[in-house]
Image (cartoon, helix red, strand yellow):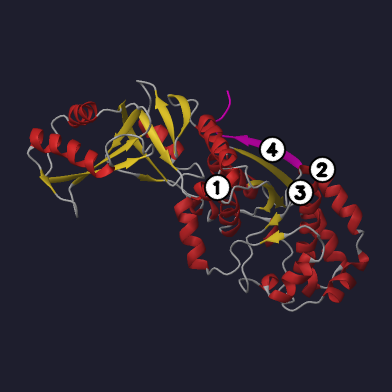
Amino acid sequence: MNSIVVHYQEIALKGRNRPWFIRRLARNLRVVTADVGVVAVKVLMGRLELVLAPDADWGAVRQRVERTFGIANFSRAGRVALDVDRIAEAILQDMGELQVGSFRVSVRRADKRFPLTSPQIEREVGGRIKQAKGWRVDLGSPDLEVHVETLTDEAFFFYGKEPGPGGLPTGVSGKVTCLLSGGIDSPVAAYRMMKRGCRAQLVHFHSYPIMSRASQEKVREIVELLTRYQLHSRLAMVAFGDLQRRVVLSVPERMRVIIYRRLMMRIADRLARRWGARALVTGEVVGQVASQTLENLAVINAVTTLPVFRPLIGLDKNEIVAEAQRLATYPISIMPDEDCCQLFTPTHPATRSTLRDAEGAEQGLDVEALVAGAVEHAEVEEFRFPPRG
């Protein structure tokens, strides 16, 4: 088989913008498969085709395609001239010595000008296979389903469909800036925004040199994994330990977590605007920890005029863990580290703070100087997939 046929679903509903979404999906596929034996990506009627080199690494291509947002499903396929005899001959040749008890042929016509209808093609191709193989036709639960898709001058045949990740192609929905810890939640939140076509730029707050570099190394691993989905990631490493010490010296203990979060949001806001992002993203969940009550979330939101998206807001921990395990970020996230959330944490944090409480607690801080300094000294790293030599 010399092709991969890619089907999309949500993109098909985009009306006059559909060609732009399809072009972006094709572009992303060209980038992600450039080094694994795909010689061309073609936009066809209602589908895309990846043309494989004779020595293409199907396993590697499959791994790349199954992570490309915008794809509903894909199949390794054979391409043949649009002729019933040629189609049946190619299928039989490809089957070789395969033996099954029952089969069916399912046909989809992209171009209705072909003189035979789909049921007629099914009968013609199926009849030839039955005659050659002697297999029983079973339209309900066949052992093997042969798919045939006809275009204007050619047809594809394949035997199964691999699920894609769905969603929208990376880059079609603009940029967001995601606050990324080394924990379980925020990588899943970033992934969910990526799946909606956003390019997630990432900000990690660490406490080095007060604490070790462990959280930074974890986050780099997580970003490398997420970059396999969105192909290019930008990560800002923000030193936060000194800001936390300033907060400890000036802010009442019960308000420290809220002030930490407000400073983080201000810093992320500055970086987002510098990078052209249109929203901030966090992995917060209502009621999961003290800072994530509705009252506290409202106080934290007050420092930015950018929209703040919380894709996990209504999930429970088991649901988030299950998604992290599917993404393979979970084993990285549970590795021990020393992140800034563990530094100078109060015993009894405020759970129902008010804006007046927060603004009063910040009176002893030069907030503007702290934020500007953190942004100025942030270390920015770029990640790409596939890696460039």
Point 26% across, 28% down: residue: 83
- Which badge, 3 or 2, is on the more N-terminal residue? 3
**In the rendered structure, are the residues bearing label 2 and label 4 in contact, judged by CB atoms less than 8 Å apart?**
no
What residue is pinned by disc 2?
Answer: 377
Point 87% across, 54% down: residue: 370
Q: Nearer the viewer, residue 57 or 209?
A: 57
Q: Nearer the viewer, mark 2 or mark 4?
A: 4
What residue is pinned by disc 3?
Answer: 272
Point 46% across, 60% down: residue: 322
Q: In which quadrant of the rendered image does the C terminus lie?
A: top right
Q: Amino acid at mark 2?
A: His
Q: Give the residues in magenta.
A: 379-389
Residue 319 part of the magenta segment: no
What residue is pinned by disc 1?
Answer: 168
Picture quarter containing residue 170? top right
Q: Nearer the viewer, mark 3 or mark 1?
A: 1
Q: Nearer the viewer, mark 1 or mark 2?
A: 1
